[in-house]
């Protein structure tokens, strides 16, 4: 089923690319397309192609994120990412590729939103579902953009034919993100029609994180609690480190904790490429060989050094190998596929797992109450228990005691646990920025003063040179 879904997406994205190259009037295409359920579904599938490709989430996005957190570094051509003084030309080009791919997917989402409701043979109910999926994906993409670039040009179905679009404020981008996610929450089904399709629970999870970024703790906590109360998800139980392959392994099609993932297959060109390449010497964790661009040190990095060895996640993620950086160097193997082809690994990219949702809930519920609550502690303990091989829903010897924490120390605990749980998923840096502690943590752990220009990515030349509504000085992020 996984392979079938990525094949469908790939075929549809190729159709989308050919339409881009064909500058014949698109009104004609709209008249003969978007009229049946199958045509509408193909149009929705085309949204996924650019956003999950090698230029975006297949490599660029998580790889760029993973050189930034307190727990790791980048090497090779990505070394400037971990120097925190701004990006060099090579990495500016990489983030430009992410930008371009996200806007291509946004364009494809806009086409669905404007055309599908007018389809001759599509029922209103089906049209609402297709549009809801398009708005969910558009919301997700703008959410990635606003956290990495700040305000960006807003392109929707209303202005998608305009070349020159001013840079919107951060607040305006969040207004669109919320509007789309709220619409998706109403329109999407409670059960995914296929692995990789969003549901109303995925929309609620997105809203929980968006509201966290807006410091709307009540709404964040409420959305997270709704997902928990649905009983639609549960953590996968583990007993040994290798059991985490039941969550992240290349053969996994779906799990009980999958809320929304980008789906990949070993088949060319649908694999999780380069980001998943972690092979060096005798360590064949990726069949295609490849890169080891991110690493950490087990003795000098305090976040790693203080990580309890009994935590099964630690052994699952790391392997120790000297790549010329010292004998205590460790590389990541979370997304490993020993028989991957050169087209990429079969591992899926977990945008939202149930573990994410539980940790969203732990933080937002405590902040909403201005103190740790029993419900917040339960959500945290579920994730922590699983990490040590205990049943997530039963009390365990490793449970945290609510009586030992005030609000500040509890939030610190949640943030630490989320750092361990989502390590190498491209999420930690965004958490540190949201919390306002990114510069502090990098100075404490790495001894580096982070330049202000490093807090945001530069708006690429593909936008600045051709969008006449932008001022090349005033609208560029500081330092670029």
Image (tube, rainbow, N blue to C red):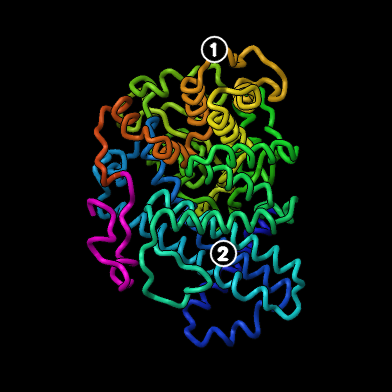
Residue for badge 2:
47
Eye-nearest disc, 2 or 1:
1
Determine if the magenta segment contains residue 465: yes
Element under label 2? helix
**Magenta span of residues:** 455-480
Residue for badge 1:
404
| 380 lies left or right of 23 | right
Element under label 1? helix
Instruction: Quadrant for the C terminus, please.
Output: bottom left
The front one of 271 and 97 is: 97
Secondary structure mostly seen in the magenta stretch: loop
Report the residue at 57% width, 35% height from top.
360
Q: Position of residue 196 (x, y in %)?
A: 65, 53
Q: Is residue 334 above or below residue 254?
A: above
Q: Is residue 27 above or below residue 56?
A: below
Determine if the magenta segment contains residue 472: yes
Report the residue at 68% width, 40% height from top.
227
Q: CA distance from mark 2 to mark 1?
A: 47 Å
Q: Is residue 79 above or below residue 477?
A: above
Report the residue at 50% width, 68% height from top.
156
| 392 lies left or right of 448 | right
Report the residue at 59% width, 74% height from top.
114
Instruction: Quadrant for the N terminus, please.
Output: bottom right
């Amino acid at each position: 089923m996984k392979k079938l879904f990525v094949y469908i997406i790939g075929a549809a994205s190729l159709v989308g690319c050919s339409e881009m190259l064909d500058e014949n009037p698109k009104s004609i295409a709209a008249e003969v397309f978007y009229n049946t359920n199958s045509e509408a579904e193909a149009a929705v599938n085309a949204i996924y192609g650019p956003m999950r490709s090698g230029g975006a989430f297949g490599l660029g996005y998580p790889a760029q994120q993973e050189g930034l957190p307190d727990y790791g570094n980048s090497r090779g051509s990505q070394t400037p990412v971990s120097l925190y003084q701004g990006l060099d030309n090579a990495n500016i080009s990489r983030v430009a590729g992410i930008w371009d791919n996200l806007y291509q997917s946004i364009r494809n989402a806009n086409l669905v939103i404007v055309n599908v409701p007018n389809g001759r043979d599509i029922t209103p109910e089906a049209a609402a579902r297709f549009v809801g999926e398009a708005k969910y994906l558009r919301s997700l993409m703008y959410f990635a953009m606003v956290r990495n670039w700040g305000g960006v040009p807003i392109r929707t179905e209303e202005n998608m034919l305009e070349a020159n679009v001013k840079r919107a404020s951060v607040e305006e981008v969040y207004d669109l993100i919320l509007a789309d996610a709220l619409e998706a929450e109403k329109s999407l089904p409670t059960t995914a029609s296929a692995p990789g399709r969003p549901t109303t629970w995925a929309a609620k999870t997105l809203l929980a994180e968006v509201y966290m970024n807006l410091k709307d703790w009540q709404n964040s906590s409420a959305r997270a609690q709704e997902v928990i109360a649905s009983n639609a998800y549960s953590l996968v139980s583990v007993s040994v480190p290798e059991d985490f392959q039941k969550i992240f392994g290349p053969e996994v099609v779906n799990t009980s904790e999958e809320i929304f993932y980008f789906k990949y297959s070993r088949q060319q060109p649908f694999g999780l490429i380069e980001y998943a390449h972690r092979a060096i010497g005798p360590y064949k964790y990726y069949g295609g060989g490849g890169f080891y661009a991110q690493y950490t040190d087990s003795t000098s990095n305090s976040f790693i050094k203080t990580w309890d060895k009994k935590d099964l996640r630690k052994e699952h993620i790391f392997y120790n190998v000297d790549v010329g950086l010292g004998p205590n160097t460790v590389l990541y193997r979370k997304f490993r596929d020993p028989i991957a082809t050169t087209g990429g690994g079969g591992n899926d990219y977990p945008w939202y797992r149930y573990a994410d949702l539980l940790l969203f809930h732990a933080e937002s519920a405590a902040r909403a109450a201005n103190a740790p609550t029993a419900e917040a502690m339960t959500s945290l303990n579920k994730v922590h228990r699983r990490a040590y091989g205990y049943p997530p829903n039963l009390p365990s010897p490793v449970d945290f005691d609510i009586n030992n924490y005030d609000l500040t120390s509890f939030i610190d605990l949640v943030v630490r646990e989320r750092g361990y749980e989502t390590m190498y998923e491209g999420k930690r840096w965004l958490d540190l920025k949201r919390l306002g502690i990114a510069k502090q943590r990098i100075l404490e752990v790495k001894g580096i003063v982070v330049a202000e220009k490093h807090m945001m990515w530069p708006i690429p030349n593909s936008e600045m040179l051709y969008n006449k509504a932008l001022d090349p000085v005033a609208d560029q992020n500081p330092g670029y």
